[in-house]
Amino acid sequence: MLGQNGFEFPEGKVSAWTVVENNGTTEQWTKTWTFDSPRAAGEIAGIFDTKMAASWSKAQGREGGWAWKDEKGQAWAATMAVTDLKDGHWTASIQVKRG
């Protein structure tokens, strides 16, 4: 099943996908989702990592960190965090910054 924003979950393994934050500027922004899934923490993190790795590179020495350059050669960095709130309720958040 494709969750909103392109995160692919196995059929029937994600529900209640909700965007709870989406704000910032053209230089930096944060997007946060909540969702329900019975998957283990490692599986959930792997789903997000797979999607991000399709376009971005892991940032060396930064847990949950990603980096890439845009079409103008500008450097960007992102940090992804996935948290098990309790009993299969999750939050995922990405913070993106230029530079």
Image (cartoon, rainbow, N blue to C red):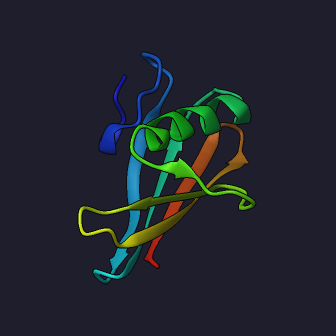
Q: Quadrant of the N terminus?
A: top left
The answer to whether one can see residue 95 in this image is no
Please tell me whether residue 52 is drawn above or below residue 75 in the rendered image: above
Q: Which of 21 and 56 is in front in this view?
A: 56
Residue 70 relative to residue 49: left or right? left
Residue 61 picture location, percent across and down: 75, 60
Q: Position of residue 46 (x, y in %)?
A: 61, 33
Residue 20 drawn above or below residue 6: below
- At x 28%, y 80%, the residue is 26
Q: In this view, does 3 lie to the left or right of 14?
A: left
Q: Check the image and report above or below for 56 versus 74.
A: above
Whole-percent x, y for residue 34 in the image: 50, 52
- Residue 10 visible to an observer of this rendering: yes
**Image point 53% across, 60% down: which residue?**
93
Q: Which residue lies furthest to the left in this view?
A: 71
Residue name at image x 69 percent, y 57 percent: 60
